[in-house]
Image: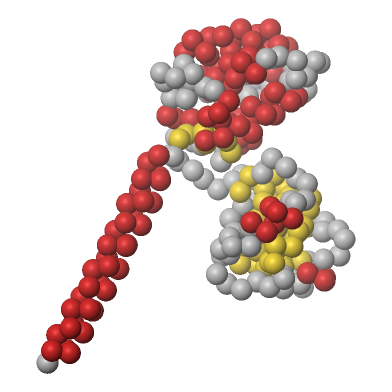
């Protein structure tokens, strides 16, 4: 009887620990979600956007036009087109693109402050609210661009990264048990350290057909692989026009 009582107590203790752990994980996940910063959280100031408007008028409007609608030479920086180009990405990617390539006729010649101000103006023009703190370089990577209704799938034609199991299909190579597609700003092959860091990344449930894979990846069949390339959404199955393919691990166990 004493043994039964102790066993019951141990069982109760174990169940309580499991419940406490589950509650802790749930609270942690909720806190993480609440601490997530997006363009809807007021990440620039009105004064900063006003400075950015002057930068835009002087250096950007000739190509992107006064209404940010874009032209034959430059993509739109406003409305649905802007969101399709940039949602599910961070302000750091947008800032880096602008700082590296703009102004078109004299790129990378403005100060970082001017480029930050121009990003603030783009956010204001697109209806994202202002806040009490100016946008700074050290905050860019933490701010997600997304629609009012929250995150969505990465759109078609975005440059993405996925990790899955390389499988020979009937006519194509396929990544099975793949992670969801996430944006990347770098189409080139990941280095050894980056690939090694992906080894512990859990596999997913997605399947992507790989297009234009070169050279022939037959030696990697069954391996856990990272694919980068341009995503093509298709009702018959999503595809990736591959820029690079790298081996993460020589086996593809389900984590």
Residue lying farthest right?
215
Quadrant of residue 239 within the rendered picture = bottom right
| Residue 212: image location, x then y, percent | 82, 56
| Residue 158: image location, x then y, percent | 67, 43
- Image point 78% across, 46% down: which residue? 188
The image's colour scheme reads secondary structure
**Whether residue 17 is situated above or below residue 82 in the rendered picture:** below
| Residue 3: image location, x then y, percent | 17, 90
Give the quarter of the figure containing the N terminus: bottom left
Give the quarter of the figure containing the C terminus: bottom right
**Whether residue 4 is situated above or below residue 229 in the rendered picture:** below
Residue lying farthest bottom?
1
| Residue 133: image location, x then y, percent | 44, 19
Residue 253 in view? yes
Residue lying farthest front?
2
Quadrant of residue 238 within the rendered picture = bottom right
Is residue 255 shown left or right of residue 133? right
Quadrant of residue 210 within the rendered picture = bottom right
- Image point 82% across, 70% down: which residue? 218
> In this view of the protein, which residue sits in the foreground, 196 or 148?
196
> In this view of the protein, which residue sits in the foreground, 47 or 191?
191
- Image point 78% across, 69% down: which residue? 220
**Whether residue 190 is situated above or below residue 137 in the rendered picture:** below
């Amino acid at each position: 009887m004493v043994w039964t009582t102790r066993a019951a107590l141990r069982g109760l203790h174990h169940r309580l620990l499991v419940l406490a752990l589950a509650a802790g994980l749930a609270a942690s996940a909720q806190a993480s979600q609440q601490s997530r910063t997006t363009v809807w959280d007021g990440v620039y100031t009105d004064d900063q956007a006003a400075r950015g408007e002057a930068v835009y008028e002087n250096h950007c409007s000739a190509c992107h036009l006064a209404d940010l609608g874009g032209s034959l030479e430059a993509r739109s920086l406003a409305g649905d087109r802007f969101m399709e180009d940039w949602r599910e990405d961070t302000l750091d990617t947008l800032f880096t693109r602008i700082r590296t390539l703009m102004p078109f006729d004299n790129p990378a010649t403005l100060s970082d402050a001017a480029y930050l101000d121009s990003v603030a103006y783009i956010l204001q023009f697109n209806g994202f609210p202002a806040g009490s703190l100016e946008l700074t370089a050290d905050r860019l990577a933490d701010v997600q661009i997304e629609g009012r209704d929250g995150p969505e799938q990465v759109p078609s034609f975005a440059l993405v990264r996925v990790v899955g199991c390389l499988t020979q299909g009937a006519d194509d190579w396929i990544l099975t048990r793949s992670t969801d597609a996430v944006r990347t700003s770098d189409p080139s092959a990941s280095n050894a350290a980056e690939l090694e860091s992906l080894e512990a990344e859990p596999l997913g449930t997605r399947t992507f057909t790989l297009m234009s894979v070169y050279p022939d990846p037959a030696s990697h069949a069954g391996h856990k692989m990272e694919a980068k390339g341009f995503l093509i959404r298709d009702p018959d199955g999503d595809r990736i026009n591959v820029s690079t393919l790298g081996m993460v691990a020589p086996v593809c166990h389900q984590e």
